[in-house]
Amino acid sequence: LKRKLTNSPSQKQLLLWYHLFACETHRDVIATALGVLGGELEDKRTEQSRAIVQEMMPRMVV
């Protein structure tokens, strides 16, 4: 029964979300990103850090 639950795409997605929010570090990163995107927190990235992110993840809009 457990194998059937963990093989379903929706269950895998739920486990991913659980992992992201259960880990304190991941939760802090998500909260900061949402705060910056929502205008509640100041975006403290530098041009250098933006360039590094762009190089590492070229498809992301930063």
Image (cartoon, rainbow, N blue to C red):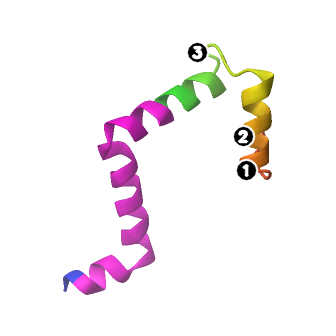
Of the numbered discs 3 and 1, the one sitting upstream in the chain is 3
Q: Are there few (<14), some (14-19), or many (20+) residues within 10 Å of tag 3?
A: few
Q: Position of residue 15 (x, y in %)?
A: 35, 62
**SS assignment at label 1:** loop
Q: Where in the figure is residue 31, as x and y percent of width and height?
A: 47, 30
The residue at which mark 1 appears reads as 57
Q: Secondary structure at mark 2?
A: helix
Image quadrant holding the C terminus, namely top right
Of the residues tagged 3 and 2, which is closer to the observer?
Answer: 2
Q: Which residues are magenta?
A: 3-30
User: Which-is-in-front pick, marks 3 and 1?
Assistant: 1
Give the residue displayed 36% in from the left and 44% down from the top. Answer: 21
The amino acid sitting under disc 3 is Glu
Percent of width and height locating residue 29: 48, 34
Quarter of the image that includes the N terminus: bottom left
Dominant secondary structure (helix, strand or loop) of the stretch shown in magenta: helix
Q: Earlier in the sequence, mark 3 or mark 2?
A: 3
Indicate the amino acid at tag 2.
Answer: Val
Label 1–label 2 contact, CB within 8 A: yes
* Image side of residue 8 versus residue 31, left or right: left
Q: Is residue 5 visible?
A: yes
Can you give x and y, in whole percent of width and height, for residue 45 in the image? 69, 22
Q: Residue at x 74, y 20 (%)?
A: 46
How far is the residue under mark 3 from the one under mark 1? 25 Å
* Residue nearest the viewer, comparing 14 with 60: 60
The residue under label 3 is: 40
Q: In the rendered image, which residue does mark 2 sit on?
A: 53
